[in-house]
Amino acid sequence: MSQTLIAPSVLAADFANLQRDVEMINKSEADWFHIDIMDGVFVPNISFGMPVLRDIVKHATKTIDVHLMIVNPDQYIQTFADLGSNILTVHYEACTHLHRTLQAIKAAGMKAGVALNPHTPVSHLKDVIADIDLVCIMSVNPGFGGQSFIENTYQKVKELKQMITDAGAATKIEIDGGVTNKNAQQLKEAGADVLVAGSYVFRSEDPIATVAGLKELTK
Ligand code: DX5
Ligand code: ZN
C-alpha cells in the first residue's frame, strides 16, 4: 500500500510570517500545500485570495493543492492555473454542471478535485468518478480551521473507496478537517490517500515533528 500523503493547510499558518511557515513545510516531510480559498458566500468566512497564493507559490517547493470554497468556481479556473495551482478542487454543492467544470480544470493543465460537504453522500459522484483525480471528503463543515472531526467520515471513505475500486478509477481520497494523530491511522485504514491538517500541525510546538509523526502513523 502506498504511503499516505500529508497536506498541511496554510490557513492555520502565521500570515505575518508566511514565508517562514512555507519554508518550514518545505523542510518537513509534508507532501502538499493545502490552500483554502473562501469567498464569504459559499462559506461564512473569507480567507485569502490570489495575491497571497502568488506569494506562497514563489516559496513553496511542493505540490499546490487548492481547495475552492467559492460560488461560481468556473469563473476562476484559468486564474488559478496561471497562479501555479497543481490541483484545483471545487465543491460539488457549488457546481451545477460538474462534469463540464472537471473538464475545464483538466484542460487548464491541473488535476481536478471535488469536495463534498458532510451532508453530501458520496454516491452523488458515481457517474463522474472516473473523471475526478481527487475527492476531498469534508470531515468538518467548511469555513473554519480548528473544528472537531465528524465520525461519520470513516463510513464515507469506505464507501467511496469501494466506488473507486468498482469503477477501476485512480481517484485519490483526501480528508479535510479535524485531522490529528487520533484519527490519522483509522482514516488510512478506511482508504484515505491524503490527509489535510491545519491547526494540528501549525499550532503544535514543533510542526516539523508533528508532520513526521503523521507520516509515521500512516506508513
Ligand atoms: C476548512 C478547510 C480546512 C481547514 C482544516 O474549511 O477546508 O482545510 O484548514 O483545518 P483543521 O485541520 O484545523 O481542521
Ligand atoms: Zn481545505
Image (tube, rainbow, N blue to C red):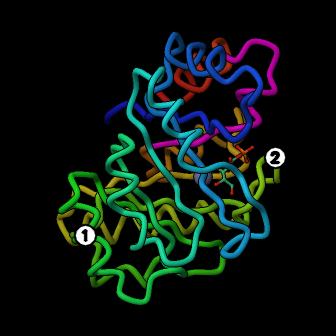
Identify the image quadrant of residue 166: bottom left
Depicted 3 relative to depicted 196: above or below: above
Could you classify mark 1 by the number of other residues whose Cα lies within 10 Å: few (under 14), some (14-19), or many (20 or more)?
Answer: some
Q: In the image, what residue occupies the spot 74% across and 59% down?
A: 46
Q: In the image, what residue occupies the spot 44% across and 35% down?
A: 4
- Residue 146 is marked as 2
Q: Residue 187 placed where, x, y %?
A: 56, 47
Amino acid type of the residue that numbered disc 1 sits on in the rendered structure: Ala
Magenta segment range? 194-207
Could you tell whether 48 is left or right of 22 in the image? right
Tell whether position 200 is magenta.
yes
- Residue 104 is marked as 1
Q: How much space separates mark 2 and mark 1, taking CA atoms?
A: 32 Å
Mark 2 CB within 8 Å of ligand 1: yes
Mark 1 CB within 8 Å of ligand 2: no
User: Which image quadrant: the N terminus?
Assistant: top left
Front-lying residue, 86 or 132 = 86
Amino acid type of the residue that numbered disc 2 sits on in the rendered structure: Gly
Front-lying residue, 121 or 21 = 21
Q: In the image, what residue occupies the spot 77% across and 48% down?
A: 145
